[in-house]
Image (spheres, rainbow, N blue to C red):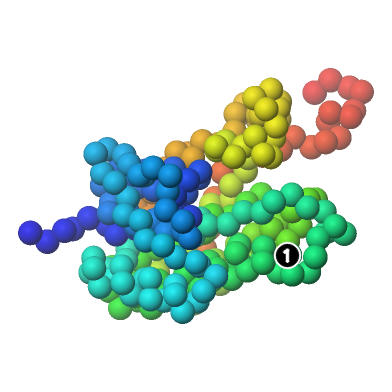
């Protein structure tokens, strides 16, 4: 019997937000392929299904091309790519080397570009085309002290997605999920202990950090037929955004 499930690739899908995205697609009935340099500590599972893991260093353009060719050869097609892999440690610009900053840009901008080019070459020839979703960040929409190269790369990623949406239409839709503060297993590295996480959550209008499943549900929607006329869009997934700092400093009630 022919497998008619949607074939979805989630980069960096072994943990955190990426694993949440993979689980949402599994729950929606897709066949999910996750990739990263190292395998997950435990299988990424949901709804009785398990994501397929394949090792890949996305910074290697040739290896990325072989990876997508292999997925298509084994499963017949690639319907959706979610470019989730990325991240950065905290570091002020004056305390960072140029080489370190270049690696951050490579991971957060050039790696998604390699993956998207490889996926597009498959999607453009298959019936129904495909969709690509970039996982952006609010760090790319405002100053990003302590993560300047990351913020710059994420700003570039959103711009890149918009251009792809124009150049690759109508076969391939390309959108960006602009993610705000998220709660993952590494949240403590950014926000401190549980009390610190709770304090940060109180700055979000909706009163909590994003759960990986929130991101996953948005990605499933953008890859679905319900989003068939959405391309070149940037979906702000930030719980209402950030309250302006001047409101906390002002001496009047709001």
**Residue 77 in the figure: left or right of residue 166:** left
Q: Which residue lies furthest to the right in this view?
A: 251
Q: Residue furthest left?
A: 1
**Residue 55 in the figure: left or right of residue 252:** left
Residue at (42% x, 53% y) in the render: 39
**Viewer-proximal residue among 209 and 184:** 184
Residue at (27% x, 38% y) in the render: 47
Asked if residue 39 is positioned above or below residue 205 in the image, the reply reads below
**Residue 26 in view, yes or no:** yes
Asked if residue 104 is positioned above or below residue 143 in the image, the reply reads below
The image quarter containing residue 191 is: top right
* Image coordinates for residue 188, horizontal then vertical, percent: 65, 34
**Viewer-proximal residue among 170 and 17:** 17
The residue beneath circle 1 is: 100
**Residue 37 in the figure: left or right of residue 190:** left
Residue at (78% x, 52% y) in the render: 91
Asked if residue 213 is positioned above or below residue 84 in the image, the reply reads above
**Residue 205 in the figure: left or right of residue 135:** right
Which element is circle 1 on?
Answer: helix
* Image coordinates for residue 190, horizontal then vertical, percent: 69, 40
Where is the C terminus found, in terms of image quarters? top right
Where is the N terminus found, in terms of image quarters? bottom left
Report the number of discs. 1
Q: Residue furthest top?
A: 253
Q: Dot 1 surroundings within 10 Å: few (below 14), some, or many (20 or more)?
A: few
* Image coordinates for residue 41, horizontal then vertical, percent: 43, 44
**Viewer-proximal residue among 194 and 76:** 194
**Residue 141 in view, yes or no:** no
Residue at (49% x, 66% y) in the render: 57
* Image coordinates for residue 172, horizontal then vertical, percent: 40, 69
């Amino acid at each position: 019997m022919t497998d008619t499930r949607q074939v979805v690739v989630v980069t960096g899908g072994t943990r955190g937000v990426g694993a949440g995205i993979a689980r949402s697609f599994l729950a929606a009935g897709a066949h999910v392929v996750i990739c990263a340099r190292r395998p997950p500590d435990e299988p990424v599972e949901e709804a009785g299904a398990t994501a397929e893991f394949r090792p890949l260093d996305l910074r290697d353009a040739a290896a990325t091309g072989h990876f997508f060719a292999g997925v298509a050869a084994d499963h017949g097609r690639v319907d959706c790519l979610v470019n989730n892999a990325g991240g950065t440690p905290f570091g002020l610009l004056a305390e960072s080397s140029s080489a370190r900053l270049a690696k951050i840009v490579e991971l957060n901008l050039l790696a998604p570009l390699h993956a998207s080019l490889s996926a597009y070459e498959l999607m453009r020839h298959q019936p129904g085309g495909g969709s690509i979703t970039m996982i952006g960040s609010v760090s790319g929409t405002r100053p990003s002290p302590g993560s300047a190269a990351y913020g710059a790369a994420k700003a570039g990623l959103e711009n890149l997605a918009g251009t792809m949406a124009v150049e690759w239409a109508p076969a391939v839709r390309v959108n960006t999920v602009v993610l705000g503060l998220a709660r993952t297993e590494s949240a403590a590295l950014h926000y401190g202990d549980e009390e610190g996480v709770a304090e940060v959550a109180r700055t979000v209008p909706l009163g909590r950090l994003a759960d990986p499943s929130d991101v996953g549900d948005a990605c499933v929607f953008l890859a679905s037929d319900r989003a068939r006329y959405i391309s070149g869009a940037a979906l702000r997934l930030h719980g209402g955004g950030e309250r302006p700092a001047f409101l906390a400093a002002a001496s009047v009630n709001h």
